[in-house]
Image (tube, rainbow, N blue to C red):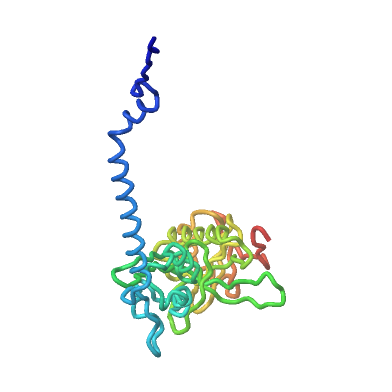
Amino acid sequence: MAKNKQTIDLRDTPVLEMLALLRPYVLPVLGITFALLVALLTWQRVERFLYEDERFTLRAPAYGAKLSPDLRLSGMQRAQSAAVRGVFRDDEGQSVFRIPLAERQRRIREIKWVRAATVSRVWPNRIDLRVEERTPVAFVQVASYRKDQPARVNLIDDEGELLPVTPGVDYALPVLTGVREDQQVAARGARVKLMRRVLDDLGPYAKSVSEVNVCQENNVRLIYPMEGRAVHLVMGGEMYRARLERFLRYYPEIRKKMPEVIRLDLRLEDRITADQSERVECDGE
């Protein structure tokens, strides 16, 4: 008696069902994988070409030159070329495509006089550096936080950054008093803004002011030249132009009655008096 034969249909198994479902995607996946490998290998070859070919090299300065001929600067007048070269010195002889632009931009912004900077690559091997320099608005005699060091003269910009005085440059700027080296930049900037507010209020008279003392925010003092004398004026915290005009209107009479007085208090609305204070204590000291 013959045994009954049993057959198994492999098509009914889960594995074959899965393979049947995946079959339409095999070729596309293989194609994409192959394309990615080709792209990766191509990029590696391109990257090696950009990094190693001499045509993309940032050349060192020629003998006697301050900067690489491939480094183009715009907007720079007071910042030192030596400081700029110091930022890019390690890049000389290297491909411009190896230069970390964001890092170089950050270091350029740390240079004195530089307020903002943009660094970009220009094909094939040029680096363009566009600089916005700071604009000085006043002289400051900065007292050192160390008692054994004398005060020094600096310039200051709207943001309160202290800037070196460039020899040989004529600055038609007032002197700002009330700034210290150990103050935060923001604190110095606030005092500069107060000075600018006072000068803006004075209008056409501002060009004659030789010094603005902002040691006390609510008691601004000015030095105003009159007939060869430096007259010290206590202005208070408001109505700067009106008070100065009143002083100018009555100055001939003041000169007759108080010929030796050069310190005047303009804060009272009905009179001008001699200023008896000896020294102004700066806010925060």
Splitting the image into 4 quarters, where does residue 16 fall?
top left
Q: Is residue 73 left or right of residue 155?
A: left
Residue 129 screen position, x and y as percent: 37, 70
The residue positioned 30% from the left and 68% from the top of the image is: 122
Nearer to the camera, 165 or 239 = 165
Nearer to the camera, 211 or 3 = 3
Quadrant housing the C terminus = bottom right
Quadrant housing the N terminus = top left
Nearer to the camera, 36 or 252 = 36
Residue 175 screen position, x and y as percent: 52, 71
The outermost residue toward the front is 1
Q: Is residue 157 left or right of residue 276?
A: left
Residue 247 screen position, x and y as percent: 50, 64
Name above or below for residue 82 compared with residue 4. Answer: below
The outermost residue toward the right is 148
Residue 259 screen position, x and y as percent: 57, 74
Splitting the image into 4 quarters, where does residue 41 fall?
bottom left
Nearer to the camera, 119 or 51 = 51
The outermost residue toward the bottom is 63
The residue positioned 55% from the left and 55% from the top of the image is: 237
Q: Please give the count of numbered marks on the rendered protein.
A: 0
The residue positioned 43% from the left and 60% from the top of the image is: 200
The residue positioned 68% from the left and 69% from the top of the image is: 145
Q: Is residue 145 left or right of residue 125?
A: right
